[in-house]
Image: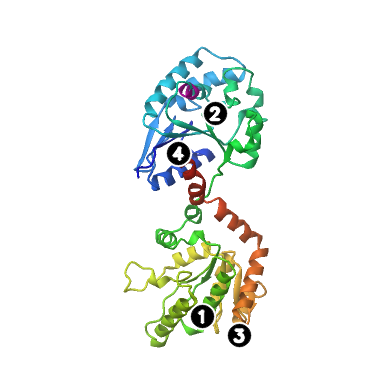
């Protein structure tokens, strides 16, 4: 099915640097990826994606010389004759660039006074029945901003920023902004939607392309609890205990996964057999998807995937905790790596781990019941404020989640 066309309108667009510009970049990137035809309309900017169309109107820029001259007069309560000329010009240009657009996200132009001729031109289109559905996406409000309030005056065109229009769909970026805008427009809170900005996890973590491909393939950023076991598959690593713990956690309603980074050692037939035993245990416990043996996820199924040090480092960045149940170790380097990555550590109670982690790890006995280990993990993670905030971000503030849960339903509703 053909996706509706979407335009995004603002004074400026990337590569101009700013919070709204960053939001526009991510909106456009995700919309294009999900198959929407996207046009950026701005005074300044450059296309940053081959399937993204850029339509520039120089007078849409808030710092265009003609716009600045009018804005400075408006801040003193004076409407220059040039205002009408700009308004007429922008209305004509908008008709041209909006041709064929079904939905237009208008960022801040309908709530800030930085280019009121552009604001007035959009309202002209609404008044004449232009078919595009306009979405007023409000990050900031001139009428309620103490730094801008003195520049607002009664009457036209300043009142455009505080007069509600039933033809508009109102969006704000937080609950506080929703209350603020509702008071300004004198409309019910629930007539305004909250769609927060998001974060791009792969960009934030600076994942390598190889890591990003694995993360996307396995949906590793959508999990409630991701435990990392960075080791080759040998019996000394006691990986079966990790499988049992994952089983218990999932029985308790926790979306818990375990990543085992290394392959078995082909020089030792017993270790190859151990890998098959682990996979059979996963089948028996019905956690085949939730226990990930990374060596199985290369481009060639017949060749084990060997992760680079950089990819393993990336996995430390996206994991929630280190799980290391070894029966025997010489020292315990993963403890040090987990410390640098700020991960909680759950590990077997053996002397080398005490030497490397001291009191900064959560120890369990080798013969401990998996239920007791699951209890330990749940108790620690529940009290970990950093983990709690991380989960809140993952659940509510990733761009993928914002697009899927909030923006696409909005588009569906408007079309």
Dot 4 or dot 1, earlier in sequence = 4
For marks 4 and 3, give the one nearer the viewer: 3
Q: What element carries label 4?
A: loop
Residue 130 on image: x %, y %:
43, 25
Read off the magenta span: 121-126
Residue 324 on image: x %, y %:
55, 76
| Observer able to see residue 267 | yes
Main SS type for the magenta part?
helix
For marks 2 and 1, give the one nearer the viewer: 2
Closer to us: 388 or 256: 256
Q: Residue 14 carries which label?
A: 4
Q: Is mark 2 on a helix, strand or loop?
A: loop
Estimate the spatial distance between the alpha carbons at disc 4 and disc 1, rounded to whole Å.
Answer: 50 Å
Q: Is mark 1 on a helix, strand or loop?
A: helix
The residue at 51%/21% (across/down) is: 120
Dot 1 or dot 3, earlier in sequence = 1
- Asked whether 188 falls inside the magenta stretch, the response is no
The residue at 44%/61% (across/down) is: 215
Which residue position is annotated with label 3? Answer: 367
For residue 358, which quarter of the picture? bottom right
| Observer able to see residue 147 | no
Which residue position is annotated with label 1? Answer: 240
Mark 2: few/some/many CA within 10 Å (<14, 14-19, 20+): few
Estimate the spatial distance between the alpha carbons at disc 1 and disc 3, rounded to whole Å.
Answer: 12 Å
Mark 4: few/some/many CA within 10 Å (<14, 14-19, 20+): some
Which residue position is annotated with label 2? Answer: 166
Mark 3: few/some/many CA within 10 Å (<14, 14-19, 20+): few
Q: In this view, does 193 lie above or below 399?
A: above
- Asked whether 123 falls inside the magenta stretch, the response is yes
Residue 66 on image: x %, y %:
48, 20
């Amino acid at each position: 099915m053909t996706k509706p066309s979407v335009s995004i309108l603002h004074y400026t667009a990337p590569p101009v640097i700013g919070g709204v510009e960053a939001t526009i970049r991510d909106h456009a990137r995700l919309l294009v990826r999900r198959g929407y035809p996207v046009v950026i309309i701005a005074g300044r900017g450059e296309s940053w994606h081959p399937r993204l169309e850029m339509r520039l109107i120089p007078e849409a820029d808030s710092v265009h010389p003609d716009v600045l001259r009018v804005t400075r007069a408006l801040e003193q309560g004076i409407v220059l004759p040039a205002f009408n000329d700009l308004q007429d010009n922008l209305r004509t240009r908008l008709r041209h660039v909006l041709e064929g657009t079904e939905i237009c996200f208008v960022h801040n132009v309908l709530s800030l006074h930085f280019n009121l001729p552009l604001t007035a031109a959009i309202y002209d289109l609404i008044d004449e029945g232009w078919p595009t559905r306009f979405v007023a996406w409000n990050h900031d409000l001139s009428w309620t901003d103490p730094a801008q309030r003195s520049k607002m005056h009664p009457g036209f065109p300043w009142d455009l920023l505080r007069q509600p229009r039933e033809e508009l769909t109102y969006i704000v970026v937080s609950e506080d902004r929703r209350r603020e805008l509702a008071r300004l427009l004198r409309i019910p809170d629930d007539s305004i939607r909250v769609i927060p900005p998001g974060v791009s996890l792969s960009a934030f973590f600076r994942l390598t392309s190889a890591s990003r491909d694995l993360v996307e393939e396995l949906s590793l950023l959508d999990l409630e609890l991701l435990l990392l076991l960075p080791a080759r598959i040998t019996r000394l690593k006691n990986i079966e205990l990790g499988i049992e713990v994952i089983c218990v956690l999932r029985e308790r309603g926790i979306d818990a996964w375990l990543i085992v980074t290394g392959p078995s050692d082909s020089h030792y037939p017993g270790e190859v057999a151990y890998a098959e035993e682990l996979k059979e245990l996963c089948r028996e416990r019905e956690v085949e998807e939730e226990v990930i043996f990374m060596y199985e996820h290369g481009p060639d199924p017949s060749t084990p995937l060997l992760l680079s040090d950089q990819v393993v480092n990336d996995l430390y960045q996206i994991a929630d905790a280190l799980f290391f149940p070894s029966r025997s170790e010489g020292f315990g380097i993963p403890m040090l790596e987990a410390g640098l990555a700020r991960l909680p550590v759950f590990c077997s109670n053996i002397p080398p781990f005490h030497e490397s982690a001291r009191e900064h790890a959560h120890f369990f006995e080798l013969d401990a019941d998996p239920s007791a280990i699951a209890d330990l993990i749940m108790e620690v993670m529940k009290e970990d404020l950093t983990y709690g905030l991380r989960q809140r971000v993952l659940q509510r503030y990733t761009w993928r989640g914002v697009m899927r849960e909030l923006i696409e339903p909005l588009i569906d509703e408007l079309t």
